[in-house]
Image: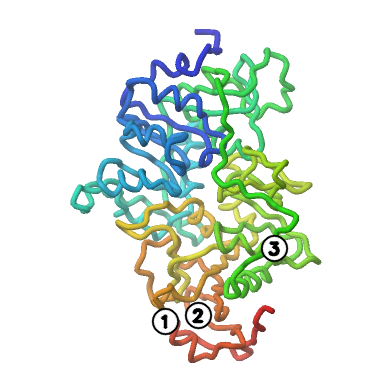
Amino acid sequence: RVNKVYSSSLEAISDIPSGSSLIVGGFGICGIPENLIIALNETGSKDFTIRLRIRRLILRIFGFSVVGWGAGILLDNKKIKRMVSSYVGENAEFERQFLSGELEVELTPQGTLAERIRAGGAGIPAFFTPTAYGTVIHEGGAPIKYNIDGSVAIESEAKESREFNGRHYVMEKAITGDYALVKAWKGDKAGNLIFRKSARNFNPAAAKAGKITVAEVEQLVEIGELDPDEIHLPGIYVQRIVVGEEYQRRVEFKTITKDDDELNIPEKHQRIVMRAAQEFKDGMYINLGIGLPMLCSNYLDPNISVNLQSENGLLGLGPFPRKEDLDADLINAGKQTVTILPGGAYFGSDESFAMIRGGHIDVTVLGAMQVSQFGDLANWMIPKKLVKGMGGAMDLVSSSGTKVVVAMEHSVKSGAHKILEECSLPLTGKSVVDMIVTEKCVFNVCPNNGLTITEIYEDQSIEDIQKATGCPFKVAEDLKTLPIPR
């Protein structure tokens, strides 16, 4: 068929058979091909592998963060056999299906997933990455499928690793799909596509990796109406194009700024984020993790200018928008609505993680469940209990050129230690943490010599820190005292 234009979403995907592997664009529910997914759910096909993989399809995707919408529709109707993803969000049905053995899940670091898809579209069968070295992603043993009794039925295999210039790297294989489903803002009848803001995310890479790529667009124009210099994805990668029937423009977390907004951060959290923010210097490029680390942006030195990067494809992250400026196509990595500052830029997920792995980010601040005395980090999984996925964390700590700061409470609520001789939870990275900031103190971390306490809050003593810390540490000769925030 020479004409790429289809009359409906259902017509565009009606021949996708059961057992197909699909690569699906989007980040959470931002930039997802929502009309194609709805149409796919209406067909009798199932057993997908979704890269996402579709059931009885195989699906490769970023995540299933919303119940009953996006890829969550396919999940709810049990059309997915295996899913390859980096983060699944707060989808209780996903967690239930996975832990009960109904769904196979291959969790993959977000940047590795983006690069595997990009490599597949570029004809590169495999590549080496520093991401995930020394973790279960590298060494094998991560659960892919559980039995009904909770035992592991299928676990991941170990991956080849090599050393280059004194650093360790893991070999990852490229991903392609029988079909790719993507969403763009505007397209022409030749299949050329333009994406909008952070809705670009995984879509361009996904489109390149499908044997047959189906694109849904909000606007379809005649050939020649798009400026060639503004096209993000050439039509050579797109075999089918359709105008989406309806767009609900849903947002997972509508976060807005109000005139009377006041910061209401607990004092112990203020201690953590205020001190962590002191690591930021003028002109730095910084990535802030979801949750507590993101609050560091409220305590920037007014005399400096920094550039906040969000791994879903945004540089120059601004504050939350006012209600009238809220835009479903402009979100951060936490799926919150945001703004972009002058001088900012949008880009795809593969480009975003090239910045991260390549050491172009100066500082990254993350939370943690556990940190070892030699800088091992665990912050993504509690086996058989908490299965959210690692998102971009493994990539963010993989570059030797980026300072990794952990911002967290010193202990869990029960009083159990979070700073340990060895992590008991699956690792995010091995010997990757440079600094730990808690409400009690600051540790510098050396992969060979362990922890040194360099700063302590004035209401704490070394004895207090020793009781709250599950491993030995040294005390700096010039130990500094930190004032309590007022």
Q: Which of 452 and 310 is in front in this view?
A: 310
Relative depth, front residue between 398 and 151: 151
Q: Where is residue 12 in the image (x, y as percent from the top left)?
A: 47, 16
* Badge 1 vs badge 2, beta-carbon distance below 8 Å: yes
- What residue sits right under mark 2 in the picture? 451
Q: Mark 1 points at which residue?
A: 471
Report x, y in % for residue 183. Answer: 56, 28
Image quadrant holding the C terminus, namely bottom right
Q: What element carries label 1?
A: loop
Of circles 2 and 3, the one toward us is: 3
Going by the picture, which residue comes out furthest to the left?
A: 149
Q: In this view, does 393 lie above or below 207?
A: below
How much space separates mark 1 and mark 2, taking CA atoms? 9 Å
Q: Which element is circle 2 on?
A: strand
**Image coords of residue 96 (percent x, y):** 31, 47
Horizontal side, residue 216 vs residue 180: left or right: right
Q: Earlier in the sequence, mark 2 or mark 3?
A: 3
Residue occupying image coordinates x 51% and y 72%: 409
Cα distance between the residues tagged 2 and 3:
36 Å
Residue occupying the far right of the picture: 303
Q: What residue is disc 3 on?
A: 262
* Amino acid type assigned to the residue bearing label 2 in the image: Leu
